[in-house]
């Protein structure tokens, strides 16, 4: 990104940025008002009541100047103004924590000291994020080592990126342009070097960019590859391997609720899939035995994300899935048009085993 | 027999103020100890909730009989300590010394049994960090957490007991010289508070580490 | 105007009653222990300040060109660890609290003088551990030691530093314990709770926090040391642990810790404003209860440091609203201080300049805290320079200004000498100007998105950084000047009378410096606090 010139206010480039800036204006106004009020009163009293004689001032009768009333007034008014701040901020926060259902999914892996970004359709980037304007984008993030934080000041959002866990961040870019990505959780030596650029492009440019992307196939396809390579398919049913009773069926699983052996229930989301691969004994499905081996050390975080995307792609088709269905199956490295959110595209397993 | 009153420290106005100050001081100290152990209890609860299978199978490795016996020993030591305080308040020198010695022996027994348990764990590779192997445990990857908390919590408790044992020795020595009586027996009383506190911590540790959910995870 | 007084043989007081190093190092006298602490914290303030200077020099240019990244990371870590644990936490309570609380309540000493001395030694040992870690190569985790970086990735001396903080924590606990018992049980006859100076109330509230909160950071650091030593996995997901649990446990103490840093300062400010307005503080009861309220509520807001950590949205909402509630008592105090000056007789002495500066800067610092308590706003601002600016406004513009004001206010009492008023006022103004120039631009940098703990930054942030660094040089100068005139005054300053400011406080009714046993006869209190009479106020 070319160096920007000196500014005192960051660009607003997402749908939430305007709201955050509005809230900021309110906070600045309230703060400026009270700061100036107190500063004025302090200076005013210091001057007006400066010592002129050595006589002591008559003790002020607090009741006569409405002492109790004053205390109540200057407790209640700040409390009221604060509650407005709270409610406004909470509302924005709530919105930020609820990605829209048909958001475009992108996967981010942070590691010391770089960002690896994987698009569904297979495109991969390092320290850059290309996205189309005016679309809801949902990032699923994880770290390979320490805690990082994916911060885009122009979008006014950030989230910590944790090892061993997935976190989520969503935004809707509204302005075409290039914006900083910063790591915003201290992560060691090159923390300040863990930066990048978001490129918000118009739809057509984005499609073009995407089409020139990685020739390895979509993430779901790469995930299916791994699924076969690691031997998952030998136990877990797939279209080719009929139900054998030893392992839970993963078709139609993603996003549904699973009954566990100990009586509890869990939602089959990204974190559940990841945990099941790395720590299979932690949650055993009801009706099955504790026989799944662990794949810890055998698969990278990037690989896990691909597996997750594959499991999503064979998830339920009735709308309970939470991600876009994958692109239609590619053969070899022919570029494909990217999937659109919604239910139109056919699932990939119509042509299994292509990779 | 009258005991000689401790010298009134120069910054106190009278003996009553001095005693009050010491007592409040000991209670405030015990509150800090609650917060200190509290942090470990918090960590325990968080991980028990996160990895129930691992914790259940790991807690199977603690010896219920030994733990229960040790608990009884410690409760008895609180009884002997309370009696020591009582006799200190009426100045019966020989009985003070007797019950302090009994407390010491019971406390020492507890620590000895704990040492045996620790050694047992070491021999069975249940000490995290080196050659760790939780044999036959479910979700073995997370069992070191249980054992780390086991050693951390009981170790911290044992450290407090060792400090207590040292102080009892000092008290025995002073009691034998007739230092404690109706006019002044504050050190015995306040140490009694400390000893009871250490006992109560164990009353919480025992169920958490030995009793709850040790039936093993679903297999 | 400096008038050096010809040497006069001073009567016996706590400073000259006994002589020799041993009499100081084995003292039971709370006043001498206060001075021992003053020496310690001053050394650490200087050391922490050197790191601050290095940081600001590096940040004057966008590139990381002064030192390597890992060295820079050690700079800000050591700056934070030293300033928080070895300077700010002890500062006012261990120096001014120790010296003044027995005087203010008519007692001969604190309840446990030997424990008081012990707590100083513990502080020194903790400090030595941190210094050792520094000399060996330092630590680069940030003062917050977030895991798993601190447990499994850092190459610094985490265990040594962690142990140093752990040990230093016991010093804080013992000081708090001592004050609680002292205030409860050692008050002179007639001195009821509501006749106590508000400085004492502030320290009582602070002591509650020290006693309840510090043990939690102790055990948290204990777990950190265990994990780093034995690879247990409390906090590292690679071994099954939870890195966010570290954050919860750490901030459970470290948030109340900021109230340990500010409450005593507020107590100082109340005393100064009252004396130099010759008026009882407005809303005495409200100020007293506000101190306690801050201490209590301060324990239930820690999650506002975890809004973007993956903490649940609902937990975030609870912590946000509680964070607003905890701000209200501070607002009450600010208004009460201001109205205290109404129809008073105001003198703009050096302590008063510091106290008024405190009001302005603490107000800004506190208000910007409201930005951070606001969920939607915090998502953008957390981990940026906005946070850095906020906490420096409250801790430096607030706590340190209060500390300096207190030092200047009670200097004549502690040492029996007056310093040069001209130089002291000049430094106060330099500090105020330098401070604002250093830290106000950082609010703007934060909103622009400059993250904290950055060694190098994009070029468009340079202008504001240069302003900030320029301010830091002025601030540094402002802090150096008092060293000179205060030390000078010890030998050459005019002898101070018992009550140079005309204050009704009990500590001003005895000689300056006080005799070792404080009072010739235990006073009996028959009047309300802050009773200004003609004879009290008339300045000799």
Image (tube, helix red, strand yellow):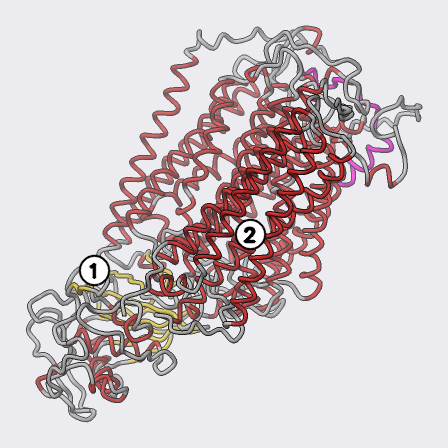
Mark 1 Cα-neighbour bin, 10 Å: few <14, some 14–19, many ≥20: few
Quadrant location, the N terminus of chain C: top right
Report the span colored magenta.
Answer: C483-503
Horizontal relation, residue C91 to residue C361: left or right:
right
Q: Nearer the viewer, residue A113 or A30?
A: A113
Q: Nearer the viewer, residue C467 or A267?
A: A267
Q: Residue at x 33, y 61 (%)?
A: B215
Residue C449: give x, y in percent of width and height: 41, 57
Q: Nearer the viewer, residue A183 or C120?
A: C120
**Which subunit holds the residue at mark 2?**
C
Residue A211's place in the image compared with B160, above or below, is below
Q: Which residue is mark 2?
A: C467
Residue C502: give x, y in percent of width and height: 70, 15
Q: Which mark is residue C495?
A: none
Quarter of the figure with residue A205: bottom left
**Which subunit holds the residue at mark 1?**
A
Q: Which residue is mark 1?
A: A263
Residue C268's place in the image compared with C538, above or below, is below
Residue C484 falls inside the magenta stretch: yes
Residue B166: give x, y in percent of width and height: 69, 46
């Amino acid at each position: 990104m070319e160096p920007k010139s000196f500014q005192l206010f960051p660009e607003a480039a997402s749908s939430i940025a305007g709201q955050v800036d509005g809230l900021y204006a309110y906070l600045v106004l309230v703060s400026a008002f009270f700061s100036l009020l107190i500063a004025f009163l302090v200076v005013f009293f210091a001057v007006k009541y400066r010592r002129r004689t050595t006589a002591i001032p008559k003790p002020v009768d607090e009741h006569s100047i409405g002492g109790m009333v004053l205390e109540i007034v200057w407790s209640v008014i700040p409390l009221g103004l604060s509650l407005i701040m709270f409610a406004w901020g909470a509302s924005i926060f709530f919105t930020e924590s609820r990605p829209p259902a048909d958001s475009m999914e992108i996967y981010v892996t942070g590691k010391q000291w770089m960002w690896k970004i994987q698009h569904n359709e297979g495109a991969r980037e390092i320290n850059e994020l290309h996205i189309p304007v005016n679309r809801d984008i949902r990032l699923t993030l994880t770290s390979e080592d320490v805690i990082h934080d994916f911060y885009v000041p122009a979008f006014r959002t950030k989230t910590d990126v944790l090892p061993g866990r997935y976190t989520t961040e969503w935004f809707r870019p509204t302005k075409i342009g290039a914006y900083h990505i910063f790591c915003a959780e201290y992560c060691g030596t090159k923390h300040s070097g863990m930066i990048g650029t978001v490129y918000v492009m118009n739809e057509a440019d984005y499609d073009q960019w995407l089409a020139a992307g990685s020739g390895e196939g979509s993430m779901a396809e790469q995930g299916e590859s791994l699924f076969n390579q690691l031997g998952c398919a030998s136990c877990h049913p797939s279209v080719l391997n009929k139900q054998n009773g030893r392992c839970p069926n993963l078709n139609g699983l993603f996003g549904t609720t699973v009954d566990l052996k100990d009586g509890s229930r869990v939602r089959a989301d990204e974190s559940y899939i990841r945990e099941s691969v790395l720590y299979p004994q932690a949650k055993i499905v009801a009706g099955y035995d504790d026989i799944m081996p662990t794949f810890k050390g055998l698969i990278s975080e990037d690989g896990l994300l691909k597996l997750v995307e594959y499991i999503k792609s064979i998830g339920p088709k009735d709308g309970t899935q939470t991600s876009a269905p994958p692109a239609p199956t590619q053969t070899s490295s022919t570029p494909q048009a990217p999937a659109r959110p919604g239910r139109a595209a056919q699932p990939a397993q119509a042509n299994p085993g292509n990779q | 027999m009258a005991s000689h009153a401790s010298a009134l420290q120069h910054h106190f106005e009278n003996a009553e103020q001095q005693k009050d100050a010491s007592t409040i001081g000991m209670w405030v100290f015990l509150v800090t100890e609650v917060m200190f152990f509290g942090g470990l209890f918090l960590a325990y609860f968080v991980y028990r909730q996160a990895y129930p299978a691992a914790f259940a199978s790991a807690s199977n490795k603690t010896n219920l009989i030994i733990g229960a016996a040790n608990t009884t020993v410690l409760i008895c030591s609180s009884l002997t300590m309370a009696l020591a305080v009582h006799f200190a308040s009426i100045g019966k020198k020989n009985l003070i010394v007797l019950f302090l010695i009994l407390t010491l022996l019971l406390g020492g027994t507890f620590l000895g049994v704990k040492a045996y348990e620790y050694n047992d764990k070491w021999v069975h590779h249940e000490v995290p960090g080196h050659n760790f192997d939780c044999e036959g445990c479910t979700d073995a990857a997370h069992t070191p957490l249980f054992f780390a908390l086991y050693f951390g919590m009981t170790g911290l408790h044992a450290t407090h007991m060792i400090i207590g044992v040292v102080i009892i020795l000092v008290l025995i020595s002073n009691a034998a010289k007739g230092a404690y009586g109706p006019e002044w027996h504050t050190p015995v009383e306040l140490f009694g508070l400390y000893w009871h506190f250490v006992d109560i911590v164990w009353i919480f540790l025992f169920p958490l580490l030995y009793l709850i959910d040790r039936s093993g995870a679903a297999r | 105007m400096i008038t050096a007084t010809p040497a006069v043989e001073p009567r016996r007081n706590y400073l000259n009653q006994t002589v020799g190093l041993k009499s100081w190092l084995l003292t039971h006298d709370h006043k001498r222990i206060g001075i021992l602490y003053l020496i310690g914290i001053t050394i650490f303030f200087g050391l922490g300040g050197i790191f601050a200077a290095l940081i600001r020099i590096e940040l004057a240019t966008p590139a990381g060109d002064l030192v390597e990244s890992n060295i820079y990371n050690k700079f800000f870590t050591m700056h934070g660890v030293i300033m928080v644990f070895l300077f700010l936490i002890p500062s006012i309570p261990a120096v001014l609290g120790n010296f003044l609380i027995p005087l203010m309540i008519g007692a001969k000493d604190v309840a446990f003088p030997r424990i008081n001395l012990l707590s100083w030694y513990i502080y020194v040992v903790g400090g030595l551990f941190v210094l050792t870690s520094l000399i060996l190569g330092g630590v680069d985790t940030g003062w917050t030691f977030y895991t798993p970086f601190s447990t499994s990735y850092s190459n610094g001396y985490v265990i040594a530093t962690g142990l140093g903080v752990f040990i230093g924590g016991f010093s804080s606990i013992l000081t708090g314990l001592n004050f609680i018992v002292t205030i409860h049980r050692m008050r002179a006859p007639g001195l009821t709770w509501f006749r106590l100076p508000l400085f004492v109330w502030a320290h009582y509230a602070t002591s509650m926090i020290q006693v309840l909160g510090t043990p939690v950071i102790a055990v948290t650091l204990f777990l950190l040391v265990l994990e780093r030593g034995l690879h247990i996995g409390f906090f590292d997901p690679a071994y099954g642990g939870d890195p966010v649990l570290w954050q919860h446990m750490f901030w459970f103490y470290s948030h109340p810790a900021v109230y340990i840093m500010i409450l005593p300062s507020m107590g100082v400010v109340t005393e100064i404003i009252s004396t130099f307005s010759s008026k009882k503080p407005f809303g005495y009861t409200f100020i007293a209860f506000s101190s306690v309220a801050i201490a209590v509520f301060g324990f239930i807001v820690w999650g506002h440091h975890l809004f973007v950590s993956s903490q649940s949205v609902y937990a975030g909402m609870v912590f946000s609203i509680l964070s607003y509630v905890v701000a209200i008592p501070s607002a009450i105090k600010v208004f009460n201080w201001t109205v205290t000056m109404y129809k008073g007789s105001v003198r703009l002495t050096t302590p008063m300049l510091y106290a008024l500066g405190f009001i302005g800067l603490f107000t800004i610092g506190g208000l910007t805290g409201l930005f951070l308590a606001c969920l939607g706003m915090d998502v953008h601002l957390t981990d940026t320079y906005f946070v850095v600016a906020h906490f420096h406004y409250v801790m430096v513009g607030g706590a340190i200004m209060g500390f300096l004001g207190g030092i200047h206010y009670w200097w004549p009492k502690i040492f029996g000498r007056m310093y040069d008023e001209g130089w002291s006022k000049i430094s106060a103004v330099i500090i105020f100007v330098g401070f604002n120039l250093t830290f106000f631009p950082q609010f703007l940098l934060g909103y622009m998105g400059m993250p904290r703990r950055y060694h190098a930054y994009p070029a468009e942030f340079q202008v504001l950084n240069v302003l900030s660094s320029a301010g830091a040089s002025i601030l540094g100068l402002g802090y150096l000047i008092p060293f000179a005139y205060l030390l000078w005054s010890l030998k050459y300053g005019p002898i101070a009378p018992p009550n140079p400011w005309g204050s009704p406080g009990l500590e001003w009714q005895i000689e300056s410096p006080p005799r070792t046993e404080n009072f010739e006869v235990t006073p009996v209190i028959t009047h309300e606090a802050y009773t200004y009479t003609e004879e009290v106020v008339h300045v000799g």
